[in-house]
Amino acid sequence: MCGIVAGVAQRNVVPILIEGLKRLEYRGYDSAGLAVINGGEIFRKRELGKVKGLEALIAADPIEGRIGIAHTRWATHGKPSTRNAHPHVSKDRVAVVHNGIIENHDHLRAALQENGYVFTSETDTEVIVHKVAEELKAAGNLLDAVGKTVKSLRGAYALGVIDCEQPDVLVACRKGSPLVIGIGIGEYFIASDIAALLPVTQRFIFLEDGDVAELTINGVTIFDEAGRRVVRPVIESQLKADSVDKGKYRHYMLKEIYEQAWAVSETLEGRFIDNRLQDNAFGHNAADVFDQIKSVLILACGTSYHSGLVARYWFEKYARVPCAIEIASEFRYRNPVVAPDTLVVTISQSGETADTLAALQEAKKLGVKHSLVICNAPESSLVRESELVLMTRAGPEIGVASTKAFTTQLVALLMLIIVVGRRFDLSAEKEEHIVSQLFALPGNIEKVLKLDNAIELLSQRFADKHNALFLGRGTHYPIAMEGALKLKEISYIHAEAYPAGELKHGPLALIDAEMPVVTVAPNNNLLEKLKSNIQEVSARGGQLIVFMDEDLAESDAADENVQIVKMPSVANAISPVIYTIPLQLLSYHVAVLKGTDVDQPRNLAKSVTVE
Ligand code: G6P
């Protein structure tokens, strides 16, 4: 997946497109490129690496134009290289930027090569640009040529296309990959998301699957998949252009870790009346839906999947609600059996994760009647395709490694457990307890953030290590998984999480002085069991870092191999949120020590809109 931004205006669009690309780098950042039409000719610049490289290239040898397309890439077909960077050009006439994957590119390439088209990249995208050039021979205009081209494509795409023989026209279309149109005054833009265009407009049209649009300085015309002219609603976004600033922090990730108390407060805000959580916080018909459901199925990927794993424990423990969870990419191809009265809950920071979206669609195909999304991106595809919605209101999350999105997902899930649980076995007392703990969360998050300096010191123990183990039990096993994921994502240290009880079934063989073992040990009913597991590691020379309740006697786990970090004492209901934070800080500091690219780690992207 990649980011695309393009525009047609009465001014030079290059600075707008460069700014848009920077805002889209979360979608990929291995190479970037831009093409404009000027004087009836295409001018193109491409550079390996991040957008700032492209920016420097253009600063050194400027290009400008009133119509242009731009792209930041996350390689799927063909390695990161200048040659494979978009835009791709055919016959010096047509230029294309593409987000998505064309599955039948081999077949199309062979046919185009027979017709004399020469391929200069290894990308699937290049077939599109040559195909448009081919179709232009017969079609009267770019719109028709693109319309014909997309009929031959199998897979997913969002496209921006320009033709130097029609220098006033930008054609855009989407199927399976996101694309919005930004409406300015006498200028129109397209982008993979609205954040890319916030500096120029707050008014947007969301294209639907199969739509093809023609943009000129006089307006936008949209056609649906069947070729009918359609009018799509214009939506006013509440987001502001400056909401993605790094502020006083060195990295977005650190800023986002520190924003968590605020983000949790925002997520709770306005959803309770006299301390009672309102059903309609989830949508106007939420009460009806909750009355009908008999079980919950959670579908998500990555960090969002980990929040769902915690929620499964909570659903069962607090409310005796049957709850299953599955990684979305597995669910969609498993041919699962799902009862129609299941509530399918998708969890997604971006709301655009292709596998999660496809899993939701699969669940609907299987006859599931009700869906709910927990999401951080208000205008995203998952929000639009779900019946009920609970927004996490964490604000834009820029760091590729998810932090505040995760903790606010946990908060949202506790809220969901309250409203669903009321219809099952959640007592009024338990509900009251959970609500009071939710409101205590921001203060406790502030307390735990005070451990930052101590954790920074601790991080030195990891900088020269190649592996780490994370242990937890119960609701804190998924927290250990999330800790391990954070460490590997940004420090490139191999890290694995285990439920501590599973140690003796294999992982103990790995223990030696070179293997730091991070243990999440809150004060709960599993603590005694966990202490035995800690002893098992310590007795074999393992180096333990134990995050433990400050009220517990240190001697409980004390040992020369054990380093204890005292955590604020909190109730079980919120301790998974609290114990997540030191693990985020630990990964952050290890990554900084190792000098990795914290906000944009290698090979990853924030929003994964391809399979
Ligand atoms: C990518 C991101 C992860 C994220 C996952 C799911 O892999 O790098 O941070 O957890 O996608 O994304 P979602 O937007 O659906 O939560």
Image (cartoon, helix red, strand yellow):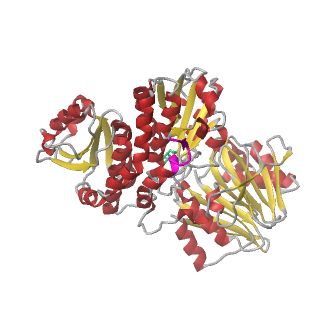
Q: Position of residue 261 (x, y in %)?
A: 43, 53
Q: Position of residue 244 (x, y in %)?
A: 54, 62
Residue at horizontal 69%, vertical 61%? 202
* Snapshot quadrant of residue 3: bottom right
| 421 with respect to 524 (left or right) | right
Q: Nearer the viewer, residue 27 or 373?
A: 373
* Snapshot quadrant of residue 363: top right
Residue 82 seen by the camera = no
Residue at horizontal 63%, vertical 55%? 193
Q: Nearer the viewer, residue 138 or 179?
A: 179
Q: Is residue 316 above or below residue 402?
A: above
Bounds of the magenta span?
A: 266-274
Residue at horizontal 57%, vertical 69%? 54
Q: Nearer the viewer, residue 486 or 436?
A: 436
Residue at horizontal 47%, vertical 30%? 325
Residue 555 seen by the camera = yes
| 435 with respect to 124 (left or right) | left
Q: Position of residue 378 (x, y in %)?
A: 62, 49
* Snapshot quadrant of residue 464: bottom left
| 606 with respect to 108 (left or right) | left
The residue lying furthest to the front in this view is 274
- Residue 599 magenta: no
Quadrant where the C terminus is found in the figure:
top right
